[in-house]
Image (cartoon, rainbow, N blue to C red):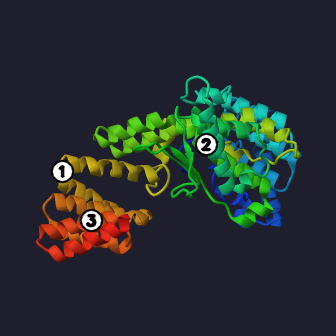
């Protein structure tokens, strides 16, 4: 899934800010907070006086930067403000100074790329983004090639390519903004066809039109005979009409991220196996998933630098607008170093992965006949307000474990609550019938079995 918000740093990290707060609405941080151009100009004057007063006469070096010299964040804030008022020459000067001050920091090259792209210089922007990737330690997006980012061995068969074309057609039908600037055979089209066809996972995957639940995009691994699949958010129709190029890029960046994420499914599966076995803690599980998912982040950014930017620059309908923050252009982290800074357990990556850990554990505890532990865990899960939509299933599993533990009356209460919350839950009716039967309540059992049969038809 897409990470929506990095934490605030406790020390100087390898990222600046989240690439995901402005892009949800398509607005800059200044527009989101209602800052007018007049107030923004006044803020720039104040910031400018601070910078000019504290800058040395010559470009600083690692050893020469004075203590009061502007930090990278201050310079980047100034660049953003200058871009907001279309002061491109000044923005580029600020970005150039940042590159000279911190030449080995990938963030400075990404910052300058942002300015070049805003000015329409896509060649320079792509070059700077590639340089940022090259300077980011062990970044798998370096020298990006789509064929190197999947699990499929050898060429795709004709039927696999046909499956890819069919899934792409469904995605374009369900998210028409993605079709507006797309042509058959162009790099986006080819990438999607091949990834759906099996290049990502080593087996075909599907498009799922259902909107994601916990993020702007999600993938679901293959399970019990059902193919893996990806989901991408729905955008506001009015926004899509008013900003068609933004919508096109936004949705494609999400799809490409999840199509890359599919290649990491074997790693996810191993972490999940360890969680189900109780071999790792919840924290280790969440960190393991977060670290694995970071490979897809880096590959998506590589796709942007090596594939999307040349495509957008030479598009037959004219140069397409672009925002590197759609493609993790402000996200430069070492997962091992940054994970501990995610303190809010209601946000990414704890949400949704901590909850997934609990769901992995419940069936295992039941199989091991550790019913009291399973029931305690399920009751704790009911208290997590952000997962209120899962309450019918939690009550259902409570009923399962309570009935297994020999408490049919408690099971009936839990299953009745599951039915109240989800009246068409056939499994809850069927299990409640078993509980009634265990108590000798034959008429009630028959009624529940009858209703379960009707719902199952």
Question: Up-down: is 132 above or below 327?
Answer: above
Q: For residue 333, which quarter of the picture?
A: top right
N-term mark: 2 or 1: 2
- Which dot, 3 or 2, sits closer to the camera? 3
Q: Position of residue 398 (x, y in %)?
A: 26, 62
Q: Name the disc covering residue 430, or none.
A: 3
- Which dot, 1 or 3, sits closer to the camera? 3
Q: For residue 324, which quarter of the picture?
A: top right
The residue labelled by disc 1 is: 370
Q: For the residue labelled by badge 2, is the local secondary structure a helix, a strand or a loop?
A: helix
Q: Looking at this view, is 446 or 14 the one in front?
A: 446
The residue labelled by disc 2 is: 257
| Residue placed furthest toward the top | 154
Give the Cα distance between marks 2 and 1. Answer: 39 Å
| Residue placed furthest toward the bottom | 443
Q: Residue at x 72, y 56 (%)?
A: 176
In the displayed structure, does residue 180 sit left or right of residue 344? right
In the displayed structure, does residue 14 sit left or right of residue 80? left
Question: Up-down: is 432 above or below 230?
Answer: below
């Amino acid at each position: 899934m897409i990470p929506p918000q990095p934490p605030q740093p406790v020390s100087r990290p390898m990222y600046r800010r989240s690439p995901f707060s402005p892009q949800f609405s398509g607005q800059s941080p200044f527009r989101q907070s209602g800052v007018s151009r007049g107030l923004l100009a006044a803020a720039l004057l104040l910031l400018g006086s601070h910078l000019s007063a504290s800058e040395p006469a010559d470009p600083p070096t690692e050893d020469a930067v004075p203590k009061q010299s502007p930090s990278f964040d201050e310079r980047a804030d100034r660049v953003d403000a200058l871009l907001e008022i279309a002061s491109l020459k000044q923005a580029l000067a600020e970005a150039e100074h940042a590159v000279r001050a911190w030449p080995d920091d990938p963030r400075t090259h990404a910052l300058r790329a942002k300015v070049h792209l805003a000015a329409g210089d896509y060649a320079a922007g792509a070059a700077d983004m590639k340089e940022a990737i090259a300077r980011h330690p062990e970044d798998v997006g370096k020298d990006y090639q789509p064929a190197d980012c999947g699990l499929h061995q050898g060429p795709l068969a004709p039927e696999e390519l046909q499956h890819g074309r069919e899934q792409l057609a469904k995605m374009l039908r369900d998210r028409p903004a993605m079709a507006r600037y797309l042509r058959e055979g162009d790099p986006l089209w080819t990438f999607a066809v091949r990834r759906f066809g099996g290049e990502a996972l080593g087996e075909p995957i599907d498009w799922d039109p259902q909107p994601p639940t916990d993020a702007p995009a999600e993938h679901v691994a293959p399970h019990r005979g059902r193919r893996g699949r990806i989901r991408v958010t729905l955008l506001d129709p009015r926004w899509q009409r008013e900003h068609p190029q933004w919508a096109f890029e936004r949705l494609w960046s999400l799809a490409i991220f999840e199509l890359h994420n599919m290649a990491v499914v074997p790693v996810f599966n191993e972490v999940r196996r360890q969680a189900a076995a109780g071999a790792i803690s919840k924290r280790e599980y969440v960190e393991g998933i977060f670290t694995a998912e970071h490979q897809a982040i880096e590959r998506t950014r590589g796709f942007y630098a090596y594939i999307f930017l040349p495509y957008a620059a030479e598009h037959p309908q004219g140069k397409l607008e672009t925002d590197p923050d759609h493609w993790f252009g402000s996200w430069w982290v070492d997962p091992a170093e940054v994970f501990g800074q995610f303190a809010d357990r209601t946000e990414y990556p704890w949400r949704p992965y901590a909850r997934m850990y609990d769901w992995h554990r419940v069936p295992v505890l039941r199989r091991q006949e550790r019913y009291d532990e399973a029931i305690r865990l399920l009751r704790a899960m009911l208290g997590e307000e952000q997962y209120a939509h899962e309450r019918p299933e939690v009550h259902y599993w409570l009923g399962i474990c309570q009935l297994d533990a020999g408490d049919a009356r408690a099971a009936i209460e839990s299953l009745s609550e599951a039915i109240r919350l989800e009246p068409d839950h056939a499994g809850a009716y069927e299990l409640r019938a078993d509980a009634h039967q265990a108590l000798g309540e034959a008429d009630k059992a028959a009624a529940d079995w009858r209703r379960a049969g009707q719902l199952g038809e």
